[in-house]
Image (cartoon, rainbow, N blue to C red):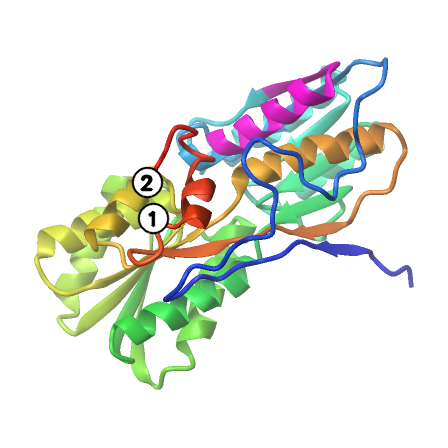
Amino acid sequence: MQRTRMRRLPQAAVATTALALAAAACGSAPASSNASSSGSKSYTFELITKSSASPYWLAVKQGADAAAAKLKNVTVKFEAPSSGTDLSAQINMVNEAVVAHVNGIILAAQSPSGLLAPVNNAQAKGVPVITVDSGVSPNVAKSFLATSNVGSAAALAKYTAKLAGGHGQYGIIDFNEVSSTGIARPKGFKQGMASFAGFSYVGQQISNNDVGTARSEASAMMQAHPGMNLIFGANDRSALGVAEAAQAAGRKIVVAGFDADLGEINYIKSGVISASVLQYPYQMGYQAVTEMVDVMHHKAVPKRVDTPYMIVTKSNVNTAAAIKAIQQYIPTYKG
């Protein structure tokens, strides 16, 4: 059996104090990249994310664009469905990119199984695929760059469960149940909560990446369960909806979030969101482009890259590490 190489980048889970991340900063190349230039040949890569509606995916795009600008002779075309649940549109985008003879595809797969055949087809036709954030199963892509969603969500659960007093009721507002991240984050959160026997789980709802839907679902969940004191919003759209519901309810609810974009950061500062996992989408986009250039040059790339994260809280949101990470979304952000 062939052994798969895995490259691990440093991870930081920040709870009551800030931990510095030994990771690539916004605007700089990850140290692990082999590609220093794209050479004389020009390349066109297609970046296809889950949607175009989230600051998270725009940060991936910004990182990819920055890498292309630095490497020269690289063009990155960006495309995404308007909705994070339009699987057929994303499949069509992958297939059309192959027909257009792009040199490579960088993909955040909406479904690990639904995108498997299109990815296999692309690579069979000579178009390599690198996946970011959300991969395909099995991992047939040249490389997969992502946060450990299970590990980070478990760490988030343990931190917020303690804030909630170690007992009570908790629920989850997920964004979908088909993508690898939509599956892994609730799984990890439940694993972390399993350490607290005093907590009971009341269930999970799906927001379909809509803030209003998440708000309505969280409100209904709180009304149905008066003892609920912890809700996990499994992505930025879900977390924002949960935050709005908690604020409107006027009761003590610990809100845990994910994909801490600027909207979540403002809620963290005000104390409505207690903690949120902040990933490094800019780095994912940047490194995916440099790795794809390596693939063009027939250089080895890691099969899996674990990208870093931090847990942002009111106590560390203004630290240098957090500010630097938030600048992925807003380069002018100063805290």
Give the extent of the magenta segment: 58-77
Residue 32's x, y, as percent? Answer: 74, 44
Is 73 a magenta residue?
yes
Residue at image coords 43%, 33%: 329
Amino acid type at image mark 1: Asn
Q: CA distance from mark 1 to mark 2?
A: 5 Å
Front residue of 127 and 250: 250
Give the crowd class for mark 2: few <14, some 14-19, many >=20 residues within 10 Å: some
Q: Which residue is mark 1?
A: 318
For image coordinates 61% across by 18% down, the residue present is: 77
At mark 1, the secondary structure is: loop
Which of these two is toward me, 310 or 239? 310
**One can see residue 256 in this view:** no
Task: Kindly give the residue lying farthest to the left in the view shown.
Answer: 250
Q: Which residue is mark 2?
A: 335
- Asked if the residue under mark 2 is in contact with the one under mark 1, i.e. CB atoms within 8 Å, the reply is yes
Quadrant where the C terminus is found in the figure:
top left
Label 2: state its secondary structure.
loop
